[in-house]
Image (tube, rainbow, N blue to C red):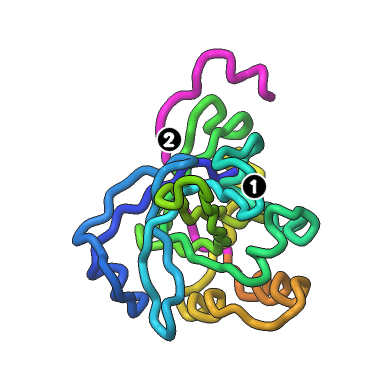
């Protein structure tokens, strides 16, 4: 699963692909882990806007701000079966810009390492995401938005390099369509997303070695 990713870009690079508005830092240079505050793209009126959200979705119905299970990724195969994901998937979409994502490799040529996938040309990747708003009724100032990255089966390249999932990447010209909520059944939204999704050309680099004992996961 995509539990870590990085976004290293500039305002100019984002504007090259998307007509964004709102406060965009001159340079975004972050490595994001679950529960980190991360920049995501949402629709504000008719415009695209970059805004911070927590990486790990907390559903609005949760009694607490902490979830006992991992919610940084949502599997597209079961997206309509889980109460955590069902409502956000049908109405609350975001796009997660990233320049690379990191995975643990337990098999393949890089076994024993955390590996980094990025585009051959180092351009931005846009991952489909969903979000929700958790409200703290006792202390409203502690309320927050949070998101999850949607995942699916990987490309052959990712499989060959030792991982079994990938974020769902979409082309820039589908970003606004994904962000626009439509009165469609969940199955239709899912089918349209997978039809538009792409497996970008990627390269792989070793990030760092896994901790001793990683062989027990094989």
The residue sitting at 59% across, 60% down in the picture is: 168
Q: Quick check: 189 above or below 160?
A: below
Q: Residue furthest right?
A: 81
Q: Position of residue 200 (x, y in %)?
A: 51, 63
Look at mark 1 in the image and give the residue it sits on.
Answer: 62
Look at mark 2 in the image and give the residue it sits on.
Answer: 206
Residue 110 appears anywhere in the view? yes
- Quadrant assignment for the C terminus: top right
Q: In the depicted view, which residue is nearer to us: 200 or 90? A: 90
The residue sitting at 58% across, 49% down in the picture is: 58
Q: Which tag, 2 or 1, sits closer to the chain's start?
A: 1
Could you tell whether 75 is left or right of 157 in the image? right
Could you tell whether 8 is left or right of 205 in the image? left
Q: Quick check: 193 above or below 45?
A: above
- Quadrant assignment for the N terminus: top right
Q: Residue furthest bottom?
A: 46
Q: In the depicted view, which residue is nearer to us: 151 or 79? A: 79
Q: Secondary structure at mark 2?
A: strand
The residue sitting at 45% across, 70% down in the picture is: 42
Q: What range is drawn magenta here?
A: 199-218
Q: Residue furthest left?
A: 26
Q: Position of residue 145 (x, y in %)?
A: 48, 56
Residue 117 appears anywhere in the view? no
Q: Position of residue 97 (x, y in %)?
A: 42, 61
Q: Is residue 171 within the magenta segment?
A: no
Number of marks drawn? 2
Instruction: Give the CA distance from mark 2 to mark 1.
Output: 38 Å
Could you tell whether 67 is left or right of 35 in the image? right
């Amino acid at each position: 699963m995509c539990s870590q990713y990085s976004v290293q870009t500039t305002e100019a690079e984002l504007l090259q692909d998307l007509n964004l508005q709102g406060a965009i830092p001159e340079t975004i240079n972050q490595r994001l882990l679950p529960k980190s505050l991360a920049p995501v793209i949402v629709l504000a009126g008719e415009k695209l806007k970059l805004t911070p959200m927590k990486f790990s979705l907390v559903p609005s119905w949760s009694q607490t701000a902490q979830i006992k299970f991992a919610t940084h990724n949502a599997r597209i195969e079961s997206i309509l079966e889980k109460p955590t994901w069902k409502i956000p998937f049908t109405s609350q979409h975001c796009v997660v810009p990233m320049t690379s994502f990191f995975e643990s490799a337990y098999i393949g040529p890089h076994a024993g390492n955390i590996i980094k996938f990025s585009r051959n040309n180092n351009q931005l990747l846009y991952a489909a995401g969903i979000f929700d708003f958790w409200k703290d009724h006792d202390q409203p100032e502690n309320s927050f938005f949070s998101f999850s990255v949607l995942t699916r089966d990987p490309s052959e390249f990712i499989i060959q390099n030792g991982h079994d999932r990938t974020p769902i990447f979409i082309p820039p010209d589908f970003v606004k369509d994904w962000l626009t909520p439509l009165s469609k059944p969940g199955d239709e939204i899912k089918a349209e997303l997978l039809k538009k999704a792409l497996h970008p050309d990627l390269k792989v680099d070793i990030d760092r070695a896994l901790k001793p004992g990683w062989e027990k996961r094989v």
